């Protein structure tokens, strides 16, 4: 019979919502689009980008929000510096301040707002952002970080730690998006597991899962692959 880690809710933490913006992304408008234009931007050390309202992705047309789409381009060095500081995959669950200027090196500010990264990629060829104004409901994948693994009694008994979900999808106001969810697994014993509904988050966050009793990790007993038959 599988045992549940009863003390979990006292050690699960979410990082604070990004109420302070430590990084500002500078961008300029793109008048034209297309593969040739994008290739030219990349050759010049820039990354094509787009920012829009997430409601535009709704399958039901009646649920789509008014269009607020901007076609932009950003400096590759700037994005690399931010990613180095924030680190993937947290870059995709972090809110940033966006400043759209009239041109490269221009001091003329055309628009300012808050954005959230919508997609993750390794080698970044394009950037997709969504507007993240306060009060806006967004669907976001929040990375799960497991800590305390070195102290697991299950590992000391010969078990192995299995990650089942490395992120969880929530719907929540933009101002309450956590950069990550930290789960302390230092008390996991053999056959213990952490379930989705064990994680406590801000009351405004709604877990988007059909089965909240699914585990996100477990401490499995040691097993031997392809054991030799007993003679």
Image: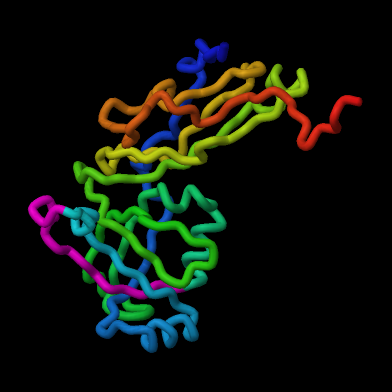
Q: Looking at this view, name the residue that lies furthest to the right.
A: 231
Quadrant of res 175:
top left
**Relative to 156, is 171 above or below?**
below
Quadrant of res 57:
bottom left
The C terminus sits in image quarter: top right
| Residue 191 relative to residue 68: left or right | right
Q: Looking at this view, name the residue that lies furthest to the left.
A: 62
**Relative to 190, is 209 above or below?**
below
| Residue 53 relative to residue 48: left or right | left
**Relative to 72, is 117 above or below?**
above
Residue 212 x, y percent position in the rendering: 37, 27
Residue 184 x, y percent position in the rendering: 57, 24
Taking depth in this image into account, of 213 and 166 the one nearest to the observer is 213
Taking depth in this image into account, of 181 and 210 the one nearest to the observer is 210
Res. 158 visible in picture: yes
Quadrant of res 178:
top left
| Residue at x 33% of width, y 60% of height | 129
| Residue at x 74% of width, y 26% of height | 222
């Amino acid at each position: 019979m599988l045992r549940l880690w009863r003390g979990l809710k006292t050690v699960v933490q979410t990082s604070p919502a990004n109420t302070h913006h430590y990084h500002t992304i500078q961008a300029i408008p793109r008048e034209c689009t297309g593969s040739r234009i994008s290739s030219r931007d990349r050759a010049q050390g820039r990354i094509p980008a787009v920012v829009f309202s997430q409601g535009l992705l709704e399958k039901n047309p009646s649920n789509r929000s008014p269009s607020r789409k901007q076609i932009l381009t950003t400096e590759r060095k700037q994005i690399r510096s931010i990613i180095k500081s924030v680190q993937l995959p947290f870059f995709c669950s972090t809110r940033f301040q966006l400043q759209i200027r009239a041109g490269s090196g221009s001091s003329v500010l055309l628009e300012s707002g808050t954005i959230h990264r919508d997609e993750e990629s390794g080698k970044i060829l394009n950037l997709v952002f969504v507007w993240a104004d306060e009060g806006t409901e967004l669907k976001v994948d929040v990375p799960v970080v497991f800590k305390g693994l070195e102290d697991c009694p299950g590992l000391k008994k010969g078990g192995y730690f299995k990650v089942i979900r490395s992120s969880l999808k929530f719907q929540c106001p933009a101002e309450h998006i956590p950069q990550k969810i930290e789960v302390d697994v230092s008390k996991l014993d053999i056959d213990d597991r952490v379930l989705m509904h064990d994680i406590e988050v801000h009351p405004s966050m709604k877990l988007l899962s059909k089965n909240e009793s699914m585990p996100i990790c477990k401490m499995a007993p040691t097993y031997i692959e392809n054991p030799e038959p007993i003679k």
